[in-house]
Image (tube, rainbow, N blue to C red):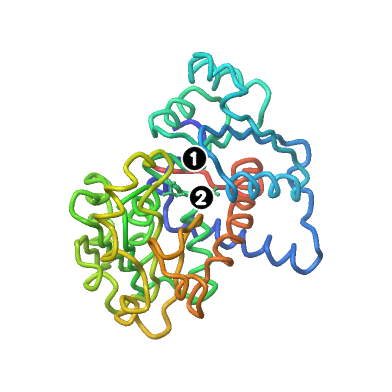
Amino acid sequence: MLKNDILSLRNLSAKQILNILDLASNLKEQLLTYGANAKYLEGKILGMVFQKPSTRTRISFETAMLQLGGNAINLSFNDLQLSRGESIEDTARTLSLYLDILMARVYDHSDIEKLSENAKIPVINGLSDLFHPCQILADFLTIFEYKRKFKDLRLAFIGDGNNVCNDLLLGCPKMGMDIRVATPIGFEPLDWVTEIARENAILHNTDLLITSDPVEAITDADVVVTDTYISIGKENEHDRREKIFLPAYQVNSDLVQHAKKDFIFMHCLPAKREKEVSSSIIDGFHSVVWSEAENRLHTQKALLLMLLRPEFYNISGLSD
Ligand code: CP
Ligand code: NVA
């Protein structure tokens, strides 16, 4: 790999993730203390391509660039010649002539791979059907803020084995966390991702379980995570999925009785209350979803800084 692209958590080592979290904490502290960040990214421009809607990813990336003294340009799919059939390859080559860095949210993960292969600038995955690395970096910062450690924590993911679940599987074992995933049969995470996660779990001596039993997954969990079971692009499966996921895979007060008493609840948002999670949980005492959403801003600032100012904040040496 000639340049540093973040397409999933697969090619980030635990040390690199910890470096990102450390820098994110410092930037957060700087913002809270002084009301502003130093303009580390003056003159730098981020392009953001969106094939799908977004609230948090779009606004937090744009705010991150502006607060660091740079600029961000929102490139809605429909406004680009992509929508009229220009190839992703030619779009990537063209955008590399104007921008310093690119973030894209795509339906098909192969689209972000094509952007990465053809762009001369760093490419960040802002969510694909398979992965959501920026979300999991923010989740890790949030977990550390509330639990002050990763090692010996147990994370339970209840729901669809989707993009969020795949990157949690890639990330948790490396960080020393146990991960237990409960999905309905037929909605498991990707096999090859689970294989990598198993290898990492053996390497780091952590526990990994994929089950269809939510109680088995959530038992003694320190961190309980869920996500929508109707991801963007799956809307036409709404009725079928609702019958499969409800009520068994809803995170509610009955289910969390099996978690540790001091568990935290996380959800990347947007959430549908009374569907994948009850209001009593997402709006309750254990929920940290607003810290999680806020931390998107801080972790993405760190990522941008590391990719755009490698002379100061080196993230080099990403493995394949
Ligand atoms: N969590 C997340 O990625 O939110 P958006 O879809 O609003 O960007
Ligand atoms: N799994 C969800 C995450 C949204 C942030 C989706 O892909 O729509």
**In the rendered image, which quarter contains the C terminus?**
top left
- Camera-side residue: 217 or 208? 217
Which residue does the numbered mark 1 point to in the structure image?
Answer: 125
- Residue 288's tag is none
Q: Amino acid at mark 2?
A: Cys
Looking at the image, which residue is at 27% across and 62% down? 181
Looking at the image, which residue is at 74% across and 64% down? 30
Crowding at dot 2, Cα within 10 Å, few <14 / some 14-19 / many 20+, comes out as many
Looking at the image, which residue is at 31% across and 68% down? 178
The quarter of the displayed image where residue 58 is located: top right
**Relative horizontal placement of residue 138, taking residue 154 as reference (left or right):** right
**Relative horizontal placement of residue 199, taking residue 71 as reference (left or right):** left
**Relative horizontal placement of residue 288, taking residue 168 as reference (left or right):** right
Q: Residue placed farthest to the bottom in the image?
A: 261
Q: Position of residue 57 (x, y in %)?
A: 58, 47
Q: Position of residue 278 (x, y in %)?
A: 42, 70
Q: Amino acid at mark 1?
A: Asn
- Ligand 1 within 8 Å, label 2 CB: yes
Which residue does the numbered mark 2 point to in the structure image?
Answer: 134
Up/down of 3 relative to 214, above or below:
above
* Tag 2 near tag 1, CB within 8 Å: yes
